[in-house]
Image (spheres, grey):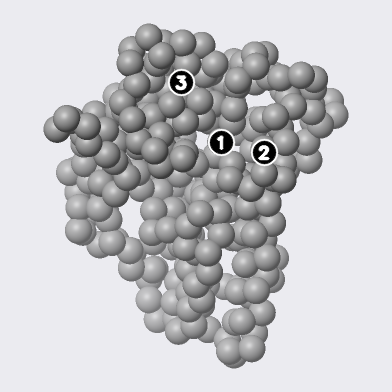
Amino acid sequence: MHHFRWRAMGTEFTLYLPEGEAHWAAGVAGELQEETRRLERQLSLYLPDSDLCYLNAHAHLHPVRVEPELFQLLQTCQSLHALTQGAFDPTITPLLRLWGFVDKQYRAPDPDTIAETLERVGMELVLLEPNGCWVYYALRGVELSFGAIGKGWAVAQCVRILRQLGVPSALVDAGGSTLYALGAPMGADGWRTRLPDGSEILLRDAALGVSGDAEQFFEVNGVRYGHILDPRTGYPAPSRPPVAVIGDDPTLCDALSTALYIEPALESIVRTRCRSVSVSTAMDGLGK
């Protein structure tokens, strides 16, 4: 078994390859490393010269033309925002800044400031023009970020490259919370994966996305505030067990796991609208 680890997009990526010579495996890993770092330069909120930072700085002044790939991601965000009734929203960035989850200077803002910030949150404020891939922000202060979908998007691009290279079996893991199992190791029915509730399942040609606030939170005066904010209210979502989503597309799994953590009632909508996605909370014993 070959395995490779590298950092990109603020997380650790891991690639497992069960077959092939070491030189070949290293070449495959190199292709994925290059791709994830390219995506980091495009999508990062923390690199001042990224495409995203340029968009956030200029799109409220005039329409900004973006690469077709980035425009496709924005269209996906728009569709998921509608599907989840606003629970998934990449324009949540002003709220993340307000609560200190961007600069790590955590604070509990007052209700009036939260209400004012909410005026700059909502995918309806991001106008997309497909003819030419133009993007325009309706208000100054609107900001996009891809923390709830970027890892899934990156994993999806890695899987695309693996298939182009003819790799029959691999596991791509982004931070332990978003992964894709391509094929299966020789002699196995799938890749063994542990879910948040401690149970294990075998994944084959399937993605897994997990969301929870167990690792990123702060406390003020004995009150716990998690990093997953509800873009509809401006406040952290209530703390609950992690949410796991299994499906065909790591991009969807990444985004929908966050949306379902925020609003568990969305499970029925996801089951109805996304046939290739299976959803459950950790307490439901998914995959047992």
User: How much space separates mark 1 and mark 2, taking CA atoms?
Assistant: 8 Å
Q: Can you say whether 274 is above or below 10 in the image?
A: above
Q: Which residue is mark 2?
A: 52
Q: Crowdedness of circle 2 by 10 Å Cα count: few (<14), some, many (20+)?
A: many
Q: Which residue is mark 3?
A: 86
- On the image, the x and y values in percent for residue 63 come to 79, 22
Say whether disc 3 or disc 1 marks the residue closer to the N-terminus. Answer: 3
Dots 1, 2 in contact, CB < 8 A: yes
Tell me the quadrant of the picture where the N terminus can be found. Answer: bottom left
Q: Which residue is mark 1?
A: 145
- Whether residue 258 sits left or right of residue 198 in the image: it is right
Q: Crowdedness of circle 1 by 10 Å Cα count: few (<14), some, many (20+)?
A: many
Name the secondary structure under disc 2: helix
- Whether residue 287 sits left or right of residue 45 in the image: it is left
Name the secondary structure under disc 3: loop
Question: As rendered, which of 204 and 7 lies closer to the eye?
Answer: 7
Dots 3, 2 in contact, CB < 8 A: no
